[in-house]
Amino acid sequence: MAVSLAAALIFAAMAVAQPPADARNRALIDDLVTANHILATEGILDGYGHVSVRNPANPSHYFLSRSLAPGLVTAADIIEYDLDSNPIGDTRAGYRERFIHGEIYKARPDVMAIVHDHSPAVIPFSVSSVPLRAVAHMAAFIGEGVPVFEIRDVDGMTDMLVSNPKRGRALAKVLGDHPAALMRGHGAVVVGATVKEAVGRAYYLDLNARLQEQAILLGGKVTYFEPEEAKKTAPQDGFVRAWDVWKRKAEAK
Ligand SMILES: [Zn+2]
């Protein structure tokens, strides 16, 4: 009895000193799950694509769901990876394109969250000579420039997937210090200083693509944001207000 009480006290003391990783990261993981559901609900991710967050307690690790449709992701599906995109103590199948995340986190210490999507509205701009440019103030970050990743420059004729570190590094290089990059014939990668910012940017990248196409179809001259306007127009709240309403909508589904 005395021994088991002592053991229980020691265990309790250890638990106070070192809460399990799951508990320490609970809020972050909850936001990551919510990000999956928002992006699925808003049609930015369908059965494919993914969103990750860097581990703030260990910046050389990040969290990403196991290979699963984003709309179905729960906290139990989240895997921790190192920046070479090796899972930490987990044997479940991961996304083949997880190298997008690891290699961008390596190249961009400022980036804390990444979305990779196949948003239908942006794909035309990844294959056309018409560049995606900012036409709407909520998407003014596009005015900082959105380069296009051409996978043929890296590996010639491929299956289009960023499924190894070499392709991930090349994508990170094209992204440079921009907020997003298009991937020719494939989709986009969008980064943020928070998961809310990355989700907001992914949402408005898609919306801007649709609005730009409509503006072009009107047939007149289109006036785009100047870089200086883009800088001045960046949302001040990191999309927090929009996140709250997107979250409620996604949870109501
Ligand atoms: Zn993809």
Image (cartoon, rainbow, N blue to C red):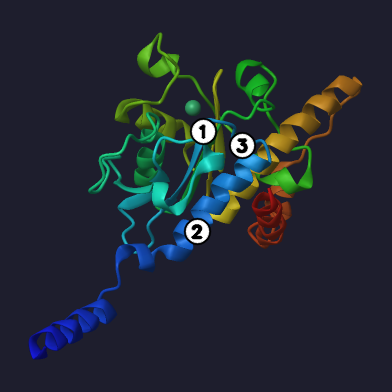
Q: Is residue 202 visible?
A: no
Circle 3 — which element? Answer: loop
The mark that comes first in sequence, 3 or 2, is 2
Where disc 1 sits, the SS reads loop
In the rendered image, the residue lying farthest to the left is 3
Quadrant, the N terminus: bottom left
The picture places residue 197, in percent across and down from the top left corner, at 59, 53
Position in image of residue 174 (x %, y %): 46, 31
Label whose residue precedes the other's in the sequence (2 or 1): 2
Q: Secondary structure at mark 2?
A: helix
Residue ranking furthest to the front: 1
What is the three-letter code of the residue carrying label 3?
Gly
Q: Nearer the viewer, residue 137 or 99?
A: 99
- What residue sits 61% from the left and 22% below the top? 126
Residue picked out by circle 3: 145
Mark 3 to mark 2 CA distance (whole Å) = 31 Å
Residue in view at x 42 percent, y 14 percent: 159
Where is 32 relative to 170, above or below?
below
Question: Nearest the camera: 133 or 159?
Answer: 159
**Residue under the point 37% across and 31% down:** 168
Q: Residues within 10 Å of mark 1 (few under 14, many from 20)?
A: many
The residues bearing labels 1 and 3 have C-alpha atoms spaced at a distance of 22 Å
Q: Where residue 117 sits in the image (x, y, percent)?
A: 56, 33
Neighbor class of circle 2 (other Cα within 10 Å; few <14, some 14-19, many 20+) is some
Quadrant position of residue 141: top right
Identify residue type, mark 1: Gly
Task: Give the labeled residue for mark 1.
Answer: 49
Q: Residue furthest bottom?
A: 2
- The residue at which mark 2 appears reads as 30
| Distance CA(mark 2)–CA(mark 1) | 19 Å
